[in-house]
Amino acid sequence: MRFRLAAFADEAANDLAGQIEAMQKNGITLLEIRGVDGENIDGISKAKARVLRKILDYVGIGVWSLGSPFGKISISDDFAPHLESFKHSLELADILGAKHIRLFSFYGTTDIDPVLERLNAFIDAAKGTDIILCHENEKGIYGDTAAKCLEIHKALPQLKAVFDPANFIQCGQDTREAWEHLSPYVEYMHIKDALPDGSVVPAGKGSGELKYLLSQYKGEVLTVEPHLSVFEGFDKLETEQKTKMRYTYPDSLTAFRTAVDSLKELTGGGLNG
């Protein structure tokens, strides 16, 4: 297995300088940009995006995807400003050199029709660009299980999938079954594992069947999304307490490094920055 590695570096540091440092220390050259300097990526100005692009180009880091929050609102919320913000993010993606935008399929409905209507509005807005829109499975949205995701992709085949194993586990969805349904639509994967109780753990330590999934995955890029627990007083705990908090880390940088190292171990080192 040989993959290129991207990361949600805002889980390592809030500021861009800290994110770059964490990526460089872990040999990562692709960024799935979600938050920087306290701002969600969809909220930054085009001027700031140009500055970010210059800095990232200078240090040799590319932007793989915008880890946007689009579709992570209630189906009953006013969609018009949400769509306008999406259109702004299409411009940001172009400035940053990102070829992907991840999005979601809305909270608060079991009716697919309004979901498809809004997702199709995103697709229409992106026409004429070379940006690939990718739906991520997420607990609580319409497309949280494999069956619901498959409904969406069959109706909108131009919408690709971001496959997140941990999110499926948190919905009680078997990840192998999900892969069988959704693999034709998968553009890339978020590397996140979880135990049956839903708690997130390093890749390969949970129930996500990540080794199997990676053996089946035909894509090029994997995005590390640590989501590991951080407890600043961890180093001061007694050994017995540390054992009970096995997958808890003293700081964000340690959690980030652990997430990357666990993926490297799982792939037998089959990663390129």
Image (cartoon, rainbow, N blue to C red):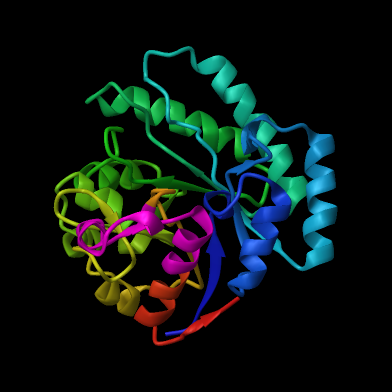
Front-lying residue, 146 or 227: 227
Quarter residue 41 falls in:
top right
Q: Residue at x 25, y 76 (%)?
A: 212
Whether 153 is drawn above or below 220: the answer is above
Front-lying residue, 147 or 197: 197
Please state, as top left, top right, bottom left or bottom right, where the N terminus lies in the image.
bottom left
In the drawing, does residue 205 fall left or right of residue 20? Answer: left
Look at the image and tell me whether residue 33 can be seen. Answer: yes
Please state, as top left, top right, bottom left or bottom right, where the C terminus lies in the image.
bottom right
Residue 69 point in image, percent of width and height: 50, 35
Give the magenta range. Answer: 234-259
Q: Residue at x 23, y 56 (%)?
A: 241
Whether 46 is drawn above or below 222: the answer is above
Residue 111 point in image, percent of width and height: 24, 24
Task: Say whether residue 98 is magenta.
Answer: no
Task: Say whether residue 256 is magenta.
Answer: yes
In the drawing, does residue 11 fall left or right of residue 139? Answer: right
Q: Residue at x 26, y 41 (%)?
A: 144
Residue 158 point in image, percent of width and height: 47, 49
Front-lying residue, 242 or 186: 242
